[in-house]
Amino acid sequence: MQEQAEKNLIPISTKITNNVVLKSMREALSALTPLIMIISLFILIGNFPIPGWVSFWQSILGNNLIETLSSSFVGVFNFVGLLVCAVMANTYGNNRGLKGITPCMVGLISFLILIPMSNQIGADVSTAYFGPNGIFIGVLVGIISVELYRFSINKKWSVKLPDSIPPAVANSLTELLPVGFVILIFVIVKTVLGLTGIESVHNLIFIFIQMPLKSLGNSLISVVLYNFIASFLWVFGINGPTITNSFWSPIMFSLTQDNLSAFQAGDKIPHIYTQQFIDIFTTYGGGGSTLSLLIVVVFISKSKRLKDLGKIALVPGIFGINEPVVFGIPVIFNLRIAIPFVIVPVVNTIISGLVFSLNWVPYTTGVMLPWTTPPIISGWLSTGSWLGSVLQLVEIILGMLIYYPFVKSLDKQYISEES
């Protein structure tokens, strides 16, 4: 079984992991995560889930200062699509062997060209296309613009300059034709779409790509599939989330930003299934929801090997670090633990999805907490309700019940080996 898995699955996962487009998407969104997390935490502090919190600070700092701080954070999220495009173009350019700031600039210029604007000088420009609604087009434009630029560079389309021109000036002028080529392509695209009545590429992307993908991702089936694949691949020694995030991250990132924007504006939160739903309400202690496994190991195992491992790994597991469990028990190619390792996150996903859909627990606000935030605390902060903590506690206990018979069986095996 192990040989077949290594022969068939590992080469496929390696190709997916090393695909330059998917790799760039992962790296770009990962690069943005610290920024979004910091801003999210400030938004959380401003809307902390304690009655009277906002009124308390308004009485001290005044309404004007509170509104100024709040509008600053709104401003950041109103341009998250533009940020995605810039980081995507820069990351993809680096992975394609293009150095310097030019790929980032090409992506930004291309993104701005496609924005519907008035011809009137000084006219107001709506931020509707710069924010969360611009995330998908930011990813696409970042990739396509850099690929067009790379194509023109490879064709050696450049202005020939005499040797007397200083190198700094010559290097900047040689970019004229490649950058001009990219700009021309995007201007043509915008013009053609305008003539066809579609008005903008944003409408095209929103209708045919963004809405279908978000509808597909914002479903219980989608998240069940995500967690099943991620856990199943770990059993064969493959980092499952690396594969699944390549496809799901842009969708979940967009859904998360929708929730965060609604939370900041005080509007109704629209989506159940976000990145916070996956991270906070389906896997406790890391992939396979191994915190439940560790608690069972610590309290019921009698073999020295399991008992020592549980003591060492429990504290890191509380903070989401589960490599000691995955490689120490091990989970990989260990059928006794692999079965609940796959089952528990799927069960958690189904229960959480039903609970949220029944409105028993408020939806996640989109606030991105540090990934080391322990359960119970994360459930409260991510939903603004103690009911989120209760749901986490129930699922951790249920996970313990599922893991229990498998741990008992493994414990007997290890005791027999030790004796």
Image: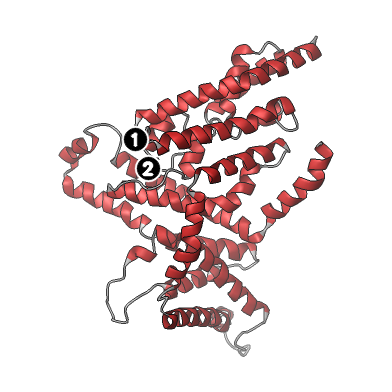
The image quadrant that residue 38 belongs to is top left
Q: Residue at x 84, y 39 (%)?
A: 3
Badge 2, how many Cα within 10 Å: few under 14, some, many 20+? many
The residues tagged by marks 1 and 2 sit, at their Cα atoms, a distance apart of: 8 Å
Left/right of residue 383 with respect to residue 404 in the rendered view: left
> For the view shown, which residue lies furthest in the right direction?
3
Q: Amino acid at mark 1?
A: Gly
Residue carrying label 2:
365
In terms of depth relative to the viewer, which is nearer, 369 or 177?
369
Q: Amino acid at mark 2?
A: Thr
The circle on residue 384 is: 1
The image quadrant that residue 313 belongs to is top right
Q: Position of residue 83 (x, y in %)?
A: 45, 60
Q: Residue at x 59, y 66 (%)?
A: 93
Q: Position of residue 105 (x, y in %)?
A: 49, 70
Mark before the other along the chain sequence, 1 or 2: 2
Quick one: SS at disc 1? loop
Badge 1, how many Cα within 10 Å: few under 14, some, many 20+? many
The circle on residue 198 is: none
